[in-house]
Image (cartoon, rainbow, N blue to C red):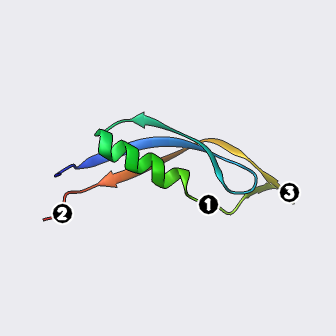
Amino acid sequence: NGIEGTVQIVISINADGSVSDAKITKKLHPDADSACLTSWSLARFKPAKQGDSPVSITNFPRRCRFKAMD
């Protein structure tokens, strides 16, 4: 569809590495916004640790860049 630009998002990550929440902070286009939310919601991370204990993280900024293909 010729959509180009960046969607900005913040995510929260559980202590097990799964994403518990995702919120858009800068929209681009409904299709791009939806794709970005879906992709980050399905992401898995190596858990952050404090000492030897896994911890959750909140408001971790991420982005999705979109560039139209010829």
CB contact under 8 Å: marks 2 and 1: no
Q: Which mark is residue 51?
A: 3
The residue drawn where x is 16% and y is 52% is 2
Determine the residue located farthest toward the left in the rendered image.
Answer: 70
Q: How many marks?
A: 3
- Residue position for label 1: 44
Dot placed on the residue nearer the N-terminal end, 3 or 1: 1
Relative image position of residue 51 (x, y in whole percent): 86, 57
Front residue of 60/35: it is: 35
Q: Residues within 10 Å of mark 3 (few under 14, many from 20)?
A: few
Q: Which mark is residue 7?
A: none
CB contact under 8 Å: marks 3 and 2: no
- Residue position for label 2: 69
Q: Residues within 10 Å of mark 2 (few under 14, many from 20)?
A: few
The residue drawn where x is 46% and y is 46% is 37
Relative image position of residue 16 (x, y in whole percent): 74, 56
The residue drawn where x is 57% and y is 44% is 11
Dot placed on the residue nearer the N-terminal end, 2 or 1: 1
